[in-house]
Image (cartoon, helix red, strand yellow):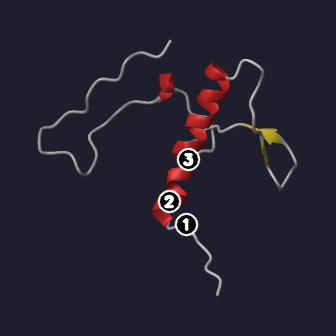
Amino acid sequence: MRFDYHLTEKGRDLWVVLAAMRQWGDRWEAPDGPPVVMKHETCGHIGAFVPICEGCGERLTRAELTPLAGPGALPGQAPLPVADAR
């Protein structure tokens, strides 16, 4: 008997977090270069995790993001200020 494990939607969403953490480790803790690189199967490019805007497709940077109260915010609750990333 064989059992295959398939990630749930929650697990697949976590991949984004893990990919960002791997890339952070590659930059700050891998002086000889990353131990693993990721190849995009569609074009063959060895690439990195890059967050993009789902609305316009542009690359996201901290300087271009403004936190706003979301639908789960309590009445009158303002978002916490985000530290300036320079």
> Could you tell whether 71 is left or right of 86 in the image?
left
* Residue 7 as seen in the image, left or right of residue 73: right
The residue carrying mark 1 is 7
Cα distance, mark 1 to mark 3? 13 Å
The 10 Å Cα crowd at callout 1, few under 14, some 14 to 19, many 20 or more, is few
State the SS at label 3: helix
Eyeballing the image, is 33 above or below 23? above
- Residue, far top: 86
Residue 53 image position (x, y, % from top left): 56, 42
Q: Residue 24 is drawn in which quadrant? A: top right
- 2 or 3: mark nearer the eye: 2
According to the picture, the residue beneath numbered tag 3 turns out to be: 16
Q: Earlier in the sequence, mark 2 or mark 3?
A: 2
Neighbourhood count class around disc 2 (C-alpha, 10 Å): few under 14, some 14–19, many 20 upward: few
- Identified at 62% across, 76% down, the residue is 4
Mark 3, residues whose alpha carbon is within 10 Å: few (<14), some, or many (≥20)? some
Question: Mark 2 highlights which residue?
Answer: 11
Q: Residue visible at 82% across and 55% down? A: 41
Badge 1 amino acid:
Leu
